[in-house]
Every structure is written in structure tokens, then in C-alpha cells.
Amino acid sequence: MTILIPAYDNDQLQPIEKMLVHKKGLKHLAISIFIISKGKILLQRRALSKYHTPGLWTNTCCTHPYWNEDIDISAKRRLKEELGMTGITLEKRNTVEYRSNVPPDLIEHEIVDIYVGKCQLNHPFKLNPDEVMEIKWLSLPQLISDIKNNPENYTAWMKIYMDLHAENIFHKNDFL
């Protein structure tokens, strides 16, 4: 199935096939979601079948909006597709841009809208095994420490978010 995502070619946003975007390293739109409960952040370990960064830990959920898809709808759609989570209010917290090589031969150059949502620890999940192999909850200090001590276990974007943007993603009251 060909997936067209919003990407820039010649400084114009247009629908471009997702794999081509990553092979050429074109700047494109993306979404990252962090779900918080009882002072902890929900992380996912990417399925081993993922086309890049398989088996690495990352934020709760991330995706690319489809061409002409509303970004808020895309965020909720992907949260349901990957983790089976519904009924969560998402708040857009930040937009960041980053560029990173993704082994073996892809490039992520994303303009990412970052969302935060809250739920109870017992919120229902239904992990999609094609997307997620496991989940865990960590406090922000635990997460930052684990990334520092085990950077090879995390996606490039997760390391970038925590190193450069955590203070603009999370609020103090998120962890009360």
C-alpha cells in the first residue's frame, strides 16, 4: 500500500510516498504523543518488524499524518492503531524540527507536533504487535537517566526530545 504523507519538495508541501521521503531525507510533517499517568510517561518498544529502529524504546506513539488529514485526527487515529487507546484528550505542546540518520540508509527530517495526554494507569490497552512489542511506565527522571546510561536502546528522536525539548513538552503539573 502506498502511503502519501505531507513533505516538502522544492519548498512546497505536497503528497509524497513515505519511503521516498525517508530515503531522500525530505523535510516532512510528523506527530509524537506522550501519555502520562500518576507522574509516569508511557513508553513503547517498537516491534521488531518495523522498517526502521526495530526493538528500540520511544515515546508513547508517533506517526506521519496522511496527506490532507487533520493533524489532531491523525494523532488520535495512531494512538488507537498502535496501542488501542481511545478516550484520551490530547494537548498540543510544541512543534520541533530535527534531522537524524536512521540506520541503515534512511533519514528522518521531521517537523513534529508534540502532544501530551493523561490517563489512569489502568486505562485499557490493546497493543498492535505489528507496531509495539512492549510498553513500560517511567518517571521523567528515570527516563532521562536511562537514556543517558543506555542511549543505544532509544530512538534518535526520543533522545533529541529529552535532550533538547523536555522543558517545552512537559509541565510541572503533568507529574503531580
Image (cartoon, rainbow, N blue to C red):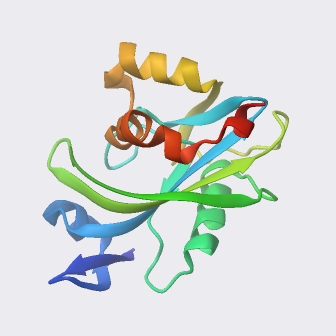
In this rendering, position of residue 37 left or right of residue 54 = right
When asked about the image quadrant of residue 112, the answer is: bottom left
In this rendering, position of residue 144 left or right of residue 125 = left
Hey, which residue is sitting farthest top in the picture? 149
**Placement of 22 over or under 59, stated as above or below:** below
Residues 98 and 70: in front is: 98
* Position of residue 110 measured from the top left corner of the image (x, y, whole percent): 32, 60
Q: Residue at point 21% right, 69% down?
A: 20
In this rendering, position of residue 100 left or right of residue 60 = left
Q: Residue at point 42% right, 63% down?
A: 30
Q: Residue at point 31% right, 69% down?
A: 28
Q: Is residue 69 visible?
A: yes
Q: Quick one: quadrant of the C terminus?
A: top right
Residues 57 and 99: in front is: 99
Q: Residue at point 19% right, 82% down?
A: 11
In this rendering, position of residue 21 left or right of residue 122 = left
**Placement of 79 over or under 147, stated as above or below:** below
* Position of residue 1 measured from the top left corner of the image (x, y, whole percent): 39, 74
**Placement of 111 over or under 3, stated as above or below:** above
When asked about the image quadrant of residue 4, the answer is: bottom left
* Position of residue 146 measured from the top left corner of the image (x, y, whole percent): 46, 17
**Placement of 168 over or under 64, stated as above or below:** above
When asked about the image quadrant of residue 25, the answer is: bottom left
* Position of residue 106 measured from the top left corner of the image (x, y, whole percent): 19, 52
